[in-house]
Image (cartoon, rainbow, N blue to C red):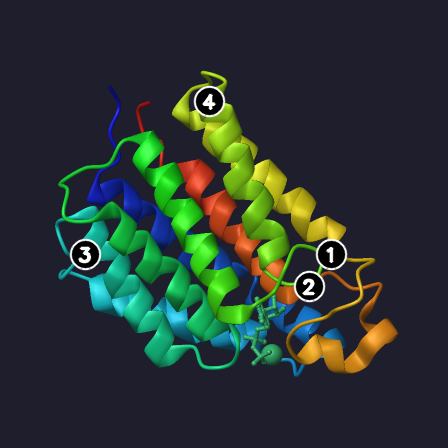
Amino acid sequence: MEQVSADDLLAWIREFARLVAENRDALTELDAAIGDGDHGANMHRGTTAVLAAVDGAAPAAPGALVKKVGTTLVSTVGGASGPLYGTFFLRLGTALGDAATASPADVAAALRAGVEGVVARGRAEAGDKTMVDALLPAVTACEEALAAGRTWAEALAAAAEAAAAGRDATTPMVARKGRASYLGERSAGHPDPGATSAALLLAAAAGTLAGGSR
Ligand code: ADP
Ligand code: MG
């Protein structure tokens, strides 16, 4: 049975960092429209620190690796998104435990634990126009695809598609959490920055977590 290794997770993190760097200005523009214009800079600072933290010193076990990502994001990103992304990766790490590799079902369960951590910490529900609107449907799509007997690569592709659709669905929403909620009705008409970065996280997963050859 196919297994997800720490190397696969490292490839995911590196690809996420690459996508954040590529989209830094776009994320900042989105946040300038309905927040304070720092989401791209915040995420880029965090992923740059993550790359430095794992460079030549990446933990060999999946759980320890993503925990290191989480602690690095918490200590470097700041803003609302730092503790939330940090919580996501820390919960992922707790769920993956000490095992040397993880099955697709283990990873799906860990992703579910991660998004539950974000919800517990930020108290945002689906429809509040936050990163939760991309993360929740992605995890559900991943679980459903695996339950339907689809391959791991297909499940990850479904998760990325659901995250992108969830991101797009935030555009007409009125924000009920975070800085964008201060704008009330005027927050409608713009995609949520955090949902946009979360869609990048799932896009990165789809390109890497099923391994290079599978
Ligand atoms: P800040 O809002 O402190 O400037 P960022 O700009 O880095 O932090 O991140 C903003 C993003 O954080 C929002 O677009 C939203 O997706 C997410 N966010 C804010 N508050 C919450 C919350 N309570 N729960 C989930 N996500 C949230
Ligand atoms: Mg901001």
Percent x, y of residue 77: 43, 77
Marks 2 & 4, CB-CB < 8 Å contact: no
Identify residue type, mark 1: Thr
Q: Earlier in the sequence, mark 4 or mark 3?
A: 3
The residue beneath circle 3 is 64
Disc 2: residue Cβ within 8 A of ligand 1's nearest atom: yes
Q: Which residue is mark 4?
A: 147
Mark 2 closeness class: few <14, some 14–19, many ≥20 residues within 10 Å: many
Amino acid type at image mark 4: Ala
Q: Pointer 1: residues within 10 angstroms few (<14), some, or many (20+)?
A: many
Single out the mark in the foreground, 2 or 4: 4
Q: Which residue is mark 1?
A: 170
Query: Residue 5 appears at what percent x and percent y?
Result: 22, 38
The Cα–Cα distance between marks 2 and 1, rounded to whole angstroms, is 6 Å
Kind of residue sitting beneath label 2: Asp
Distance CA(mark 1)–CA(mark 3)? 33 Å
Q: CA distance from mark 4 to mark 3?
A: 27 Å
Q: Residue at x 45, y 46 (%)?
A: 204
